[in-house]
């Protein structure tokens, strides 16, 4: 039997609506790669998006889906699970209603400005038992899988420090929201915080066993001045007249430090409104070695740094390929083209498998809210003059005995 999926939200992430970079979005990934599921119901508040998504589904050879502009109707359409890829401000609201009626939920990423939203998700899960899958696709990426496997195998020793970035020139996407309805335009106008923490933080949290033996204890954030978007707008005729008077609260670069109960520290950087190349910058520093995603290097304590060529430390996916999980050793070129270098394919395959076989979700409600809350905590820290802010324990103490459910079955290498 195929898993019947309902889609709520068919914009850039949901169905790559309006995208020009070849992205196929979550819907395209399901249609092209998820052999064990079928999209039977779709929802968006814009009819043109519904029509475009319906055509893609029927062109794929699947039956015409149920279509609606009211997401509540998806919850009574007989679906086995829902995928929520709406604007950030609707994620929690829709997820809560899906969980309330017992439908497993896959919720897109983003932070939350309201800690109460996090507690509502936890309370709903603990009341209903309905699972939620947080779609942090970077936890399924090849680089993140490799470094986690290296850590699980003890190659890097005991980890003391990790860092991660979300560095992505989003100026056109943000300003273009005036035409495309993209939610980031309002976010950058109204808030100043680490607004998109989970791409960089999610893999680090899994690596450090956050919510399962470890927890975040304190957050300190700092924001630079906000000038990048205004400069971009004033030099762009398409936006100058319409957005020239817009005042943005969001600082160009936000840096965040997180303290962990087991003694590790984490550094995050959000950099999305200045010219730059894309970078997630995952780094893990341990007693036996160091991993750096940006350079693709592993530096081990037993390497003779004086005689070893610097270039020999690169290309970690080749030098350490045996540490990669099977999903990345067997992935096909076609699957790697399916979205974000293949990680969307791997993530959705895992989600459908968990729903179909009633397996625990590797990224569950406790992981989701622990990562999402960094947005609200960073906002408090910045507004208070870069003060330390305490992190809630959303597990209510259960993190001490919870077992880590990894996103992969990592190979055990005996060396």
Image: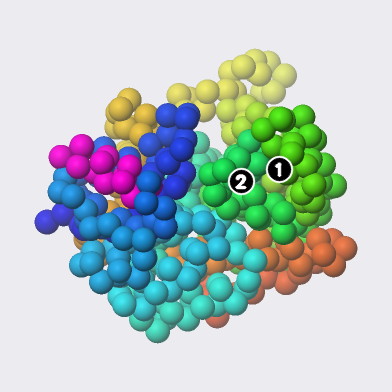
Residue occupying the point 43% across, 64% down: 364
Count all numbered tags in the image, as a single digit: 2
Residue designated by label 1: 242
Q: What is the x, y in percent for residue 94?
A: 43, 68
Q: Earlier in the sequence, mark 1 or mark 2?
A: 2
**Quarter holding the N terminus?**
bottom left
Q: What is the x, y in percent for residue 372?
A: 58, 62
Answer left or right for 115 relative to 247: left
Q: Is residue 58 magenta?
A: yes
Towards the viewer: 142 or 156: 142
Start-end of magenta stretch: 49-61
Q: Is residue 372 above or below residue 177?
A: below
Residue designated by label 2: 178
Towards the viewer: 290 or 198: 198
Q: What is the x, y in percent for residue 407?
A: 40, 52
Crowding at dot 1, Cα within 10 Å, few <14 / some 14-19 / many 20+, comes out as few
> Mainly helix, strand or loop, the magenta region?
helix
Answer left or right for 302 relative to 229: left
Residue occupying the point 32% across, 25% down: 333
């Amino acid at each position: 039997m195929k898993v019947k999926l309902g889609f709520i939200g068919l914009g850039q992430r949901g169905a790559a609506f309006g995208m020009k970079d070849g992205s196929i979005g979550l819907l395209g990934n399901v249609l092209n790669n998820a052999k064990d599921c079928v999209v039977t119901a779709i929802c968006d508040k814009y009819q043109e998006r519904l029509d475009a998504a319906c055509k893609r589904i029927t062109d794929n050879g699947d039956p015409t889906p149920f279509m609606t502009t009211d997401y509540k109707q998806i919850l009574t359409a007989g679906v086995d699970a829902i995928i929520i890829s709406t604007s950030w401000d609707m994620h929690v609201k829709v997820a809560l209603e899906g969980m309330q009626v017992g439908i497993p939920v896959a919720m897109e990423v983003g932070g939350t400005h309201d800690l109460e939203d996090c507690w509502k998700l936890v309370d709903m899960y603990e009341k209903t038992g309905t699972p939620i899958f947080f779609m942090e696709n970077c936890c399924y990426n090849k680089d993140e899988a490799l470094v986690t496997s290296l850590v699980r195998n003890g190659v890097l020793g005991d980890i003391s420090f990790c860092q991660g970035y979300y560095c992505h020139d989003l100026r056109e996407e943000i300003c273009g929201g005036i035409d495309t309805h993209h939610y980031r335009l309002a976010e950058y106008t109204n808030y100043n915080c680490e607004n998109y923490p989970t791409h960089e933080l999610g893999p680090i949290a899994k690596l450090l066993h956050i919510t399962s033996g470890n927890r975040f204890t304190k957050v300190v954030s700092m924001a630079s001045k906000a000038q990048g978007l205004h400069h971009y707008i004033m030099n762009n005729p398409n936006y100058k007249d319409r957005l020239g008077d817009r005042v943005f609260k969001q600082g160009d670069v936000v840096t965040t430090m997180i303290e962990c109960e087991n003694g590790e520290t984490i550094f995050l950087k959000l950099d999305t409104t200045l010219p730059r190349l894309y970078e997630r910058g995952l780094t893990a520093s341990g007693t036996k070695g160091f991993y750096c995603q940006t350079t693709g290097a592993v530096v081990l304590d037993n390497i003779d740094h004086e005689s070893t060529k610097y270039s020999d430390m690169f290309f970690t996916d080749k030098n350490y390929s045996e540490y990669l999980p099977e999903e990345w050793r067997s992935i096909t070129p076609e699957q790697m083209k399916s979205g974000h270098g293949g990680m969307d394919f791997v993530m959705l395959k895992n989600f459908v498998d968990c729903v179909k076989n009633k397996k625990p979700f590797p990224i569950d409600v406790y992981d989701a809210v622990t990562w999402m809350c960094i947005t609200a905590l960073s906002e408090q820290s910045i507004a208070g003059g870069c003060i330390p802010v305490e992190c809630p324990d959303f597990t209510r103490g259960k993190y001490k005995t919870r077992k880590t459910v990894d996103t992969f079955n990592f190979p055990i290498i005996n060396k």
